[in-house]
Amino acid sequence: MPAAPEHPTEGSVVTDDQQRPPAAAAFDALGADYEKAFATSKTHRRSLEWLLGRLTPGSRVLDVGSGTGRPTAETLANAGHDVLGVDVSPVMVELATRQVPAASFRCADIRDVPLGDASFDAVCVYFSLLQLDRREQADLVRYLVRALKPSGHMVLATVPLDVEDVDAAFMGQPVRVSSFTAQGFTAVAEEAGLAVLAQDASMFTPAHPDAQPEPHLFLHCRRPATTTPGT
């Protein structure tokens, strides 16, 4: 793997000079409404508490699909960790940079960001895989596992449904969604080289007039010290 780039200056924004992915348009339009809609998720808060309980002081954490920076990057940065958030939406990255100055954010497709092997103590992937197809999701998880230090932790969250390349509306925005069943998503994590230590499932209705109840699945994982990530 190529060497990791220099970590951006605290509170900075780096924008890749490339065509914006289609997913960015939906989240540009949602902006701060996305944060408000998911602010009451107790399962997400429990997941962050689980991760915080396993990090050593000053851990380097990658937040994939960092959105507005809340609650993930803000919670981790406030606990003293070195957080890099990556998101495809310029609007989201601008909001996150303003709201969470203690973290760094980069506007890019995470697949285009060179990540050094074993360069992060933890990786968070909260609901940011859903607009990739199944093969792309599995490939990305493997890529992220390689960026995780041995014995490091990864949290993966998704909406566990048996769907692939389905056109849908999310909070009034058109999106194309792919996902796995809970069993299939667990298999993706394990085949990438992760040990799934715990799972947390719930039903959640975003606080938005166009939102519908949706199942949420959180996988709390660790990269074993002696296991090579899946290829």
Image: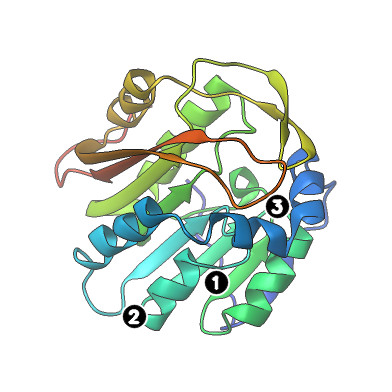
**Residue 121 image point, x, y percent:** 31, 62
Residue furthest to the front:
209
The image shows residue 52, relative to residue 229, as above or below, that is below
Q: Which mark is residue 88?
A: 3
| Image depth: mark 3 or mark 1 in front | 3
Q: CA distance from mark 3 to mark 1?
A: 19 Å
**For the point 34% across and 80% down, which residue is it?**
79
First reached walking from the N terminus: tag 3 or tag 1:
1
Residue 3 against residue 184 in the figure, above or below: below
Q: Residue at x 52, y 24 (%)?
A: 179
Residue 126 in the figure: left or right of residue 208: left
Disc 3 and disc 2 in contact, CB within 8 angstroms: no
Kind of residue indicated by mark 1? Glu
Answer yes or no: do the residues labelled 1 and 2 have beta carbons within 8 Å? no
Please name the residue that numbered disc 2 is placed on.
79
Q: Quadrant of the C terminus?
A: top left
In depth, the one of 127 and 83 nearer the eye is: 127
What's the residue type where badge 3 is placed?
Answer: Val
User: Quick check: can you spot residue 89?
Assistant: yes
Question: Residue 72: x percent and y percent?
Answer: 46, 64
Which residue position is annotated with label 1?
6
N-terminal of the two: label 3 or label 2?
2
Give the class, few, some or many, for how many residues have Cα within 10 Å of label 1's Cα (few <14, many ≥20): few
The x and y percentages for residue 28 are 79, 55
> Alpha carbon of mark 3 to alpha carbon of mark 2: how far?
25 Å
Tell me which amino acid carries mark 2.
Answer: Ala
